[in-house]
Amino acid sequence: MNQQWLKARQTKYAAYAAVYVLVVITIFAITNVLANRYNRSHDFTANKRYTLSDQTAKIVKGLKQDATITYFDQTTHFSQAKDLLDRYANLSPKVHVQYVDPDRNPQVARDANIRNYGTTVVQVGLKKEDATGMTEQGITGAFIRDLKDTTRTVCFVGGSGERQIDDADRNGFSQFNELLAKDNYQTKAISLLQAADVPGDCTVLVVAGPVRDYLQPEVDAIKKYVEGGGHALLMLDPPLKMGKDPIADNDALTAVIQSWGVTLDKDLILDMNPIGQVAGLGPQVALVTTYTPHAIVAEMKGTATGFPLSRSLEIKSGDKTQVDKLFDSSPTSLATTKLSSPSVNPNDPQNKRGPLTLAAAGTYDTDPPNVQGRFVVVGGSSWAANSFITFNGNSDFALNAVNWLSADEDLISIRPKEQEDRRVTLTQAQMNGVRLFSQFGLPLAVVFVGVSVWWRRR
């Protein structure tokens, strides 16, 4: 009787079903355990919208002490911040995330001086900073301000037609100024004409495309600053002699830079690379896609940069200087020395052929030897202007150069990008088509398939 029961069809089906249920339960249990222990996600969006940048990962993974991110908002709005903040927590076990409702915990909000919903506070050790917004830029910026105790000031030289940090026109540097502020730099404009000396609080000195010649006292001040252990970013445009504002040769300043091992040639680079033309760039924009292993550009592999209206450089290390190339123009580029005419003959045998050096970085050994001057020379300044600094990796190169000059190598990386607006715009006719298809087309298709199956079985 027992053997017949064991051989019964119902018994076999019940056993099979029990085994299947146990297998499914086991799979779900193992999956949940692994999911809780190993938190992994994959971002398949085109612009990596849900992936934190390399710079954020470098800063967070390099934390030496515990950090706490506290989000203050109403409980029903916690979900708005959870996705982004969880990404920070997943980067390092030293990052802890807290959610506080100011209405339910008014004393905690009062102690943190919280006045608005949606405020995020980042604390590293004993130092606290408010994020400028619920974005990666805002939160990572708060981390940087927590970690950087000293005030760092970038001084922009003015008085000879240089690009200005308060100029919001296409040729101005207002966007560069904003990017520096996000990296916790202070900026100010200075004049070397009033006092021929670089202020002592300048961490980095920037010379951005002077149109007129520097006077000798200005040149001497820059020379004294770098050779005394200062750090300078020097962007000198080619001395074009056409248009209403011809650019001066600035021989006195270029002579000092040459004494450090960087010769600025009096030419204009034209890039005949067809890839640049596909990207909508003219030949006056030198396209760069490969870089040297130098710290400024080592992490920019695979990132393109563009340098409009630039000149070529020649580098050579000296007794007190060590000069390294950062990148070249493409092999299809050329440089013309005819700077008075807008027309250029690409086949002119006097043209220099690429690749041509566009930027270089160097160090100057001072006395005492434990102090070292640093300088970065770029053969143009238009690449950092408002009209072009948003081109691919230009902003990364600009900030990386300043980070290296200020000895903040830990900040050198690819920074958070603004989220792209990828919305789909439909005409009224297209919207009507989508509505008719979803309201009538799909339901009718389901009904048709159902009737077809019923008729076939019948």
Image (cartoon, helix red, strand yellow):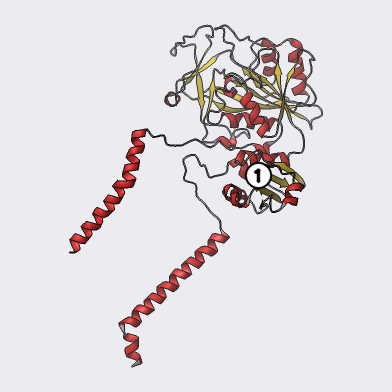
Question: Where 337 falls versus 401 (above or below)?
Answer: above
Question: Which of the 4 image quarters holds residue 175?
Answer: top right
Question: Where 365 falls versus 57 (above or below)?
Answer: above
Q: Is residue 294 left or right of residue 368?
A: left
Circle 1: residue type? Tyr
Q: Is residue 106 left or right of residue 244?
A: right
Question: Which of the 4 image quarters holds residue 224?
Answer: top right
State how many labels appear: 1
For the C terminus, the quadrant is bottom left
Question: Can I make out residue 318 in this image?
Answer: yes
Q: Where's residue 330, x and y in %?
A: 49, 25
For the N terminus, the quadrant is bottom left
Q: Residue at x 34, y 90 (%)?
A: 3
Of the pair 115 and 172, the residue shown nearer to us: 115
Q: Where's residue 44, x and y in %?
A: 46, 45
Q: Is residue 396 left or right of residue 200?
A: left
Q: Residue at x 49, y 39 (%)?
A: 47
Q: Classify mark 1: helix, strand or loop.
A: loop
* Circle 1 crowding by C-alpha within 10 Å: few under 14, some 14–19, many from 20: some
Of the pair 299 and 7, the residue shown nearer to us: 7
Single out the residue that lies furthest toward the bottom: 1
Q: Where's residue 355, x and y in %?
A: 51, 23
Question: Which of the 4 image quarters holds residue 423?
Answer: top left
Q: Where's residue 441, x and y in %?
A: 29, 46
Name the residue that disc number 1 marks. Answer: 117
Of the pair 272 and 208, the residue shown nearer to us: 208
